[in-house]
Each structure stands twice: as structure tokens, then as C-alpha cells.
């Protein structure tokens, strides 16, 4: 199980918050700012978890997730949808695209950490900080 988490987020404030909280808990993280970059980084890094914002430039999160799930070497990487879309059917659309679950913005930091631990394993606390 890879402890590397690929955070896919185009909003600078959300990027900083997610990276800070995950890294402070001992997770290794990389950042992608759009769907195309997410697909490319996932292919080269093979992260243990992808936290995918669904509203992205270039290629949205639904498209990027479907593309990832279409590549046999990447299909097993869990993708968690991170979205401000809380309308009826949005969660179902994310799951249909291949996401394992959905976290709605604004989310609790404890929920983000719990998801990271569930899919990427326990953090390496010796390297935290």
C-alpha cells in the first residue's frame, strides 16, 4: 500500500490546507492542479490514493477519474471525490465515474485524515513535521 497521496485541486487555499494537514500527519503528498496533470502524475507516481476535486480546469474530475479507471495499471488506485457539489445525483455521478467515495466541501479535517488513513494506510509518523 503506497502512502503517497495525489491531491488534485485547483483552488490555492484548498491546496494549502489539504497538503498542510496531510503532511503534518506524516503522509507524502504530490499536487496536481488539473485533471490532465492528475492523470499524468498518477501514471508516473502510482499513488496509494487520489483525492480528486471534481470541478477542475482542462479536464474535470469526472473525466480524469474515468480515464484513470480505463488504464489497467491505474484502475486499482482508489479515487475519492472532493466536491462542493452537494446536489442530488452528484455523489452517484462521482461513484459512477469510478470514485470509491465522496467528501463534500467544506469538509472536516478529521474526515480528510480518516479517508487518507483508510486508503493510503497509516502515515509514517517518524517523517511527519
Image: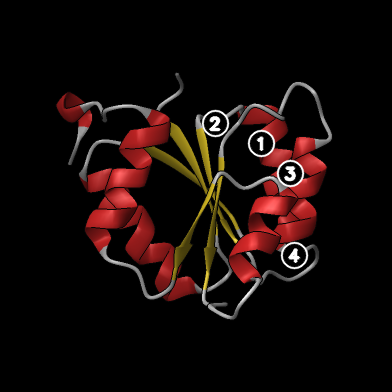
The kind of secondary structure element at disc 3 is helix
Label 4: few (<14), some or many (≥20) within 10 Å? some
Q: Which residue is mark 3?
A: 39
Which mark is drawn over residue 42? 1
Q: Quadrant of residue 56?
A: bottom right
**Disc 1 to disc 4, C-alpha distance:** 15 Å
Give the camera-side residue of 56 and 20: 56
| Distance from the alpha carbon under mark 2 to that under mark 4 | 19 Å
Q: Could you give the CA–CA distance between mark 2 and mark 3, rounded to whole angstroms?
A: 11 Å
Indicate the secondary structure of the residue bearing disc 4.
loop
Nearer the N terminus, badge 2 or badge 4? Answer: 2
Residue 89, given in percent of the width and then of the height, sits at 65, 71
In contact (CB < 8 Å): disc 2 and disc 3 = no
Do labels 1 and 2 touch, CB within 8 Å?
A: yes
Residue at 65% across, 61% down: 92
Q: Which residue is mark 4?
A: 60
Amino acid at each position: 500500500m503506497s502512502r503517497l497521496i495525489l491531491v488534485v485541486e485547483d483552488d490555492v487555499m484548498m491546496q494549502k490546507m489539504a497538503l498542510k494537514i496531510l503532511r503534518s500527519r506524516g503522509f507524502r503528498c504530490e499536487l496536481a492542479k488539473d485533471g490532465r496533470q492528475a492523470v499524468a502524475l498518477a501514471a508516473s507516481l502510482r499513488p496509494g490514493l487520489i483525492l480528486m476535486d471534481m470541478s477542475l480546469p482542462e479536464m474535470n474530475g469526472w473525466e480524469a477519474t474515468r480515464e484513470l479507471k480505463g488504464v489497467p495499471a491505474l484502475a486499482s488506485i482508489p479515487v475519492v471525490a472532493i466536491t462542493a457539489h452537494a446536489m442530488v445525483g452528484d455523489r452517484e455521478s462521482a461513484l459512477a465515474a469510478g470514485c470509491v467515495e465522496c467528501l463534500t466541501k467544506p469538509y472536516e479535517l478529521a474526515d480528510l485524515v480518516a479517508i487518507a488513513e483508510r486508503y493510503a494506510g497509516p502515515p509514517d509518523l517518524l517523517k511527519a513535521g
